[in-house]
Amino acid sequence: MDTAMVIDLGRQSLWTIALVSAPLLLVALGVGLVIGIIQAATSINEMTLSFIPKLIVMALALMLFGSWMLTTLVDFTRGIFERIPTLFI
């Protein structure tokens, strides 16, 4: 196992993490921004007002993107397991 293989595995790991986490993070960012604008416009500073809609929309996004996220993680894990025989040659 040389340094190029380790760097490539690290790069793939970081890219997979970014791909899998991006849908939920972007949805949370969008909902938080909209709720923040509404709170600023109406001067309502209630913490549950931002938490509950985020929680609901994140659950919906997880239901929508969950199968894709799981497939991506399974493909990445399968690729790692397929590399095991070539690691120590």
Image (cartoon, rainbow, N blue to C red):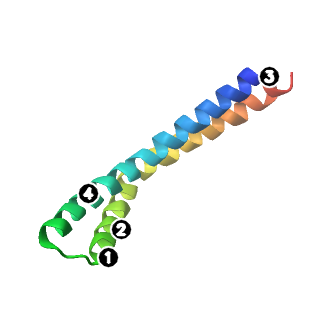
Whole-number angstrom distance, CA of label 4 to CA of label 3? 45 Å
**Mark 1 or mark 3, which has the lower sequence index?**
3
**Mark 4 or mark 3, which has the lower sequence index?**
3
Amino acid marked by disc 3: Asp
Secondary structure under badge 4? helix
Q: Nearer the viewer, residue 56 or 34?
A: 34
Give the vertical position of 58 relative to 39 (above or below). Answer: above
Number of numbered discs: 4
Secondary structure under badge 3? loop
The residue singled out by tag 4 in the image is 33
Secondary structure under badge 1? helix
* Relative side of 23 to 31, left or right: right
Instruction: Characterize the local packing of mark 3: few (<14), some (14-19) or many (20 or more) Cα atoms within 10 angstroms.
Output: few
Task: Report which quarter residue 88 is drawn in.
Answer: top right
Instruction: Characterize the local packing of mark 4: few (<14), some (14-19) or many (20 or more) Cα atoms within 10 angstroms.
Output: few
Amino acid marked by disc 1: Met
**Mark 1 or mark 4, which has the lower sequence index?**
4
x then y, percent, for residue 79:
65, 32
